[in-house]
Structure formats: structure tokens, C-alpha cells
Amino acid sequence: MKLICIGRNYAEHIEELENEKPEEPVVFLKPDTSILLKKHPFFIPDFSNEIHHEVEVLVKINRVGKHIDKKFAHKYYNEIGLGIDFTARDLQNKLKKKGLPWEKAKGFDGAAVVGQWLSKSKFKDLNSISFSLKKNETTVQEGNTSNMLWKIDEIIEYVSKYFTLKIGDIIFTGTPSGVSRVEVNDKLKGYIENEEMFSVTVK
Ligand code: MG
């Protein structure tokens, strides 16, 4: 399976990193080995001094598809989740400056937190899901899928032009503003509405 991630999908987050607003979705992949094992802590890797949390709504693909029209995209997923796209921001900035791929900064072991899954039928409107991240009991990121530049079904249409989607693939739909550095002993908890979706300790 693969993790397909969308970057720069919330305007305020684009501003906080001083990135340009993209004309098309920014897409990158993480390998399956980047998934943090359940109940394991996240270990800060030795090649970075600036690991950022990016809380993101996740979509789990449940049908094989290619060139999916956004009208039919909803048939390709049943579950919505929440996770973290951990990013070695210092390394990413170096790579970006040189125009090199970001994989080392985004795809290292443990860089993808995948929380529990909820049936999409639980939601009245998938384009109005509120979610948040607490760091040590303080809310540091708050988002709502209504603020996505590209909505879930548009993302599926776009990425399936390039990649065949397979059962079990996970889409990371981008992070809202509020990303910040994590430190040893931080406790990160993610919520969709008021439901806890994951809890991760940083080591
Ligand atoms: Mg991200």
C-alpha cells in the first residue's frame, strides 16, 4: 500500500511557511514503512533538529481505481481518519532550496501516524469536518475540511490521473496552520470533532 499526501491544501498553512499558493495540488508519497506502529512512541530521528507535526484528515481507499471522476470518487472510500504527517522541516527546507525531492524529510520510519477510522456515514458533510491536535493538552492546530483548497473527491480525481489507487491506500489531505516543532516527552492527541483518534508520545 502507499500513502499519498497532499501539501499546501490550506491557505493559512501556505502563508505560515511562506510558500506559494499552488495552481495544482502538491503531491508526494510516503512509503508504507513510514507508518508508526500502533502504541509505539515517535522517536525523533538523529538527522533532524526540527520535526514538525502536521495533523491531517485521512481517507482510506477501498476499491481499485484509475482516472476516477470526482463525481464517482465517493465510491472509492468508506472510512475517514486522522493522522500526522511528521516532517523534518530543516531537512525539507534544505532539499526544497536545491530543488530536490522531499522523501527523506517526509518518508522516514515513523513519519506517518495513522489513527483509528470512522465510517464516513457518521458525517453529515465530509466537506465540513472539524479536527484538531493537542500538544500537552494545549490545542495547537485546528482545522475544518471546508477550508481545503482541494476537497476529498477532487484530490481523488487528481491523484488517480497519476497513480492507480489500490485497496488500503491512504490519502493525507493536507494540514491547516499551527505546525510546530515537537520535543522529547511531548504528547500529541488528535481529535475529529470531540473524538480522540490517536495519542502519540515523542521520544
Ligand atoms: Mg502535510
Image (tube, rainbow, N blue to C red):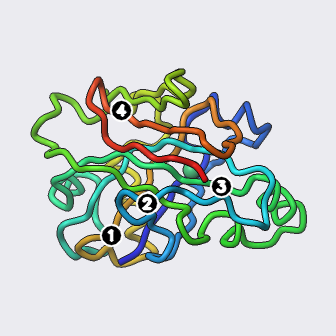
Q: Which label lies toward us, 3 or 2?
A: 2
Mark 1 touches mark 3? (CB < 8 Å): no
Residue at the spot x=46%, y=28% of the render?
Answer: 143
Question: What is the distance, in whole Å, between disc 2 and disc 1 at their CAs?
Answer: 21 Å
Disc 2 is placed on an element classified as loop
Q: Which residue is identified by label 3?
A: 87
The CB of the residue at mark 3 lies under 8 Å from ligand 1: yes
Question: What is the distance, in whole Å, between disc 4 and disc 2 at their CAs?
Answer: 19 Å
Q: What residue type is labelled 2?
A: His
Q: Which label lies toward us, 4 or 2?
A: 2
Q: Which amino acid does label 3 sit on?
A: Thr
Residue at the spot x=55%, y=62% of the render?
Answer: 111
Question: What is the distance, in whole Å, between disc 1 and disc 4 at their CAs?
Answer: 22 Å
Q: Looking at the image, is 99 positioned above or below residue 119? A: below
Question: What is the distance, in whole Å, between disc 3 and disc 2 at their CAs?
Answer: 18 Å
Disc 1 is placed on an element classified as loop
Q: Is tag 1's residue or tag 3's residue first in the polypeptide sequence?
A: 3
Side (left or right) of 62 relative to 105: left
Q: Which mark is residue 169?
A: 1
Q: Which residue is identified by label 4?
A: 191
Q: Is tag 3's residue or tag 4's residue first in the polypeptide sequence?
A: 3
Q: Which residue is identified by label 2?
A: 40
Q: Which residue lies furthest to the left in this view?
A: 121
Q: Is tag 1's residue or tag 4's residue first in the polypeptide sequence?
A: 1
Disc 3 is placed on an element classified as strand
Question: What is the distance, in whole Å, between disc 3 and disc 4 at their CAs?
Answer: 20 Å
x and y percentages locating residue 21 in the rendered image: 68, 41
Mark 3 touches mark 2? (CB < 8 Å): no
- The one nearer the camera, 113 or 154, is 113
**Screen quadrant of the N terminus:** bottom left
The CB of the residue at mark 2 lies under 8 Å from ligand 1: no
Side (left or right) of 166 relative to 96: left
